[in-house]
Image (cartoon, rainbow, N blue to C red):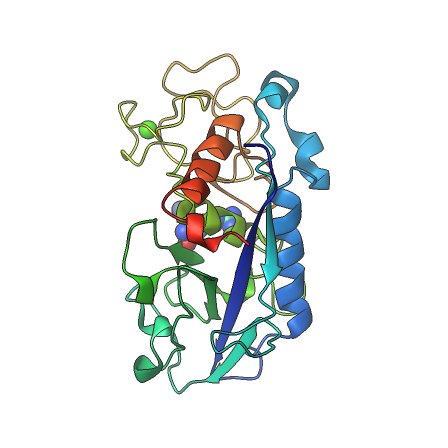
């Protein structure tokens, strides 16, 4: 279908220091980015080279901070947890109160987003559809969350969440997760075959795997470039995400 799909979001802020206890404004700035990127209304979409402009997709997905908590009580959609943990890793500890984090809200009704200080330069990670409910959602380091407060260049435009929510809605990396090979696939038919991931701010065209003259779609949210360089999903990626919301994650929609 063509309808707008709405997803209720809860943001769990898990903090040891004042800086990590990011403001409501910073959280809201992230939701605003998601609502532009998943409607293809982001201003920097103009950076897409002409040869790729026909590939741009509008996911027609909207994100709303939850207004009702799991008990049926009013909520801001933001929870705040004080922790003694100095950093968190990819081990899901941030998702459990008994490990210094915050427990998930029911994953069939809320997109859980945890924000804390991640270690080792990790910007974020996500759980694909079909996994356990108590770890379902996305995790993002606070300096790469939203566009204000502690958000820090070059990851201060909220694109880590755009990328991680892409995984949560069943998207794979655009280079096919095969190291630098040309045999991997992201299971999307309109994305060019691409060798390895791109980082930083590549110059167009960036050719790999005989994908010239247009080359890699490095300006896609599912590559690894800087926030100001990733600006689009393709129609094929959009279709995969909407299928996920109509099947595995259909209970989320409100
Ligand atoms: N999972 C990736 C990482 O932690 C996220 C990359 C997001 N990229 C970005 N430009 N915000 O490395
Ligand atoms: Zn990723
Ligand atoms: Ca590849």
Q: Is residue 30 above or below residue 175?
A: below
**Is 52 rendered above or below residue 2?**
above
- The count of marks equals 0
The answer to whether one can see residue 198 in this image is no
Specify whether 75 is left or right of 165.
right
Residue 21 occupies which quadrant of the picture?
Answer: bottom right
- Residue occupying the point 41% across, 46% down: 167
* Residue at x 38% of width, y 67% of height: 119
Residue lying at the far front of the rendered structure = 72
- The quarter of the displayed image where residue 120 is located: bottom left
Q: Is residue 245 left or right of residue 67?
A: left
User: Which is more toward the observer, 10 or 221?
Assistant: 10
Residue lying at 41% horizontally and 33% vertically, measured from the top left? 174
List x then y, in percent, for residue 145: 56, 61
Q: Is residue 182 above or below residue 68?
A: above
- The quadrant of the image that shows the C terminus is bottom right
Q: Position of residue 232 (x, y in %)?
A: 58, 35
Residue 213 showing in the rendered view: yes
Q: Quadrant of the N terminus?
A: top right
Residue 103: image quadrant is bottom left
Viewer-proximal residue among 66 and 179: 66
Q: Position of residue 227 (x, y in %)?
A: 58, 47
Give x and y (percent) for residue 83: 42, 85
What residue is at 45 percent from the left and 58 percent from the top?
Answer: 123
């Amino acid at each position: 279908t063509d309808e707008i799909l709405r997803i209720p979001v809860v943001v769990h802020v898990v903090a040891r220091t004042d800086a990590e206890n990011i403001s409501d404004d910073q959280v809201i700035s992230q939701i605003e980015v998601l609502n532009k990127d998943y409607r293809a209304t982001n201003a920097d979409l103009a950076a897409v080279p002409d040869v790729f402009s026909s590939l741009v997709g509008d996911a027609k997905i909207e994100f709303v901070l939850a207004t009702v908590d799991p008990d049926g009580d009013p909520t801001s959609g933001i929870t705040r947890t004080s922790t003694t943990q100095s950093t968190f890793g990819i081990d899901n500890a941030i998702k459990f109160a008994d490990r210094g984090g915050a427990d998930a809200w029911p994953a069939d009704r809320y997109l859980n987003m945890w924000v804390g200080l991640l270690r080792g330069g990790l910007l974020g990670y996500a759980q694909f559809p079909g996994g356990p409910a108590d770890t379902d959602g996305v995790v993002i380091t606070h300096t790469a969350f939203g566009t204000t407060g502690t958000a820090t260049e070059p990851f201060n435009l909220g694109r880590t969440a755009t990328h991680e929510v892409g995984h949560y809605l069943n998207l794979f990396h655009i280079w096919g997760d095969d190291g630098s090979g040309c045999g991997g696939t992201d299971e999307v038919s309109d994305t060019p075959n691409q060798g390895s991931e791109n980082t930083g701010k590549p110059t167009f065209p960036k050719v790999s795997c005989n994908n010239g003259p247009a080359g890699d779609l490095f300006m896609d949210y599912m590559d690894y470039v800087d926030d100001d360089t990733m600006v689009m999903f393709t129609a094929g990626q959009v279709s995969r995400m909407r299928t996920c919301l109509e099947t595995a994650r259909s209970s989320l929609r409100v």
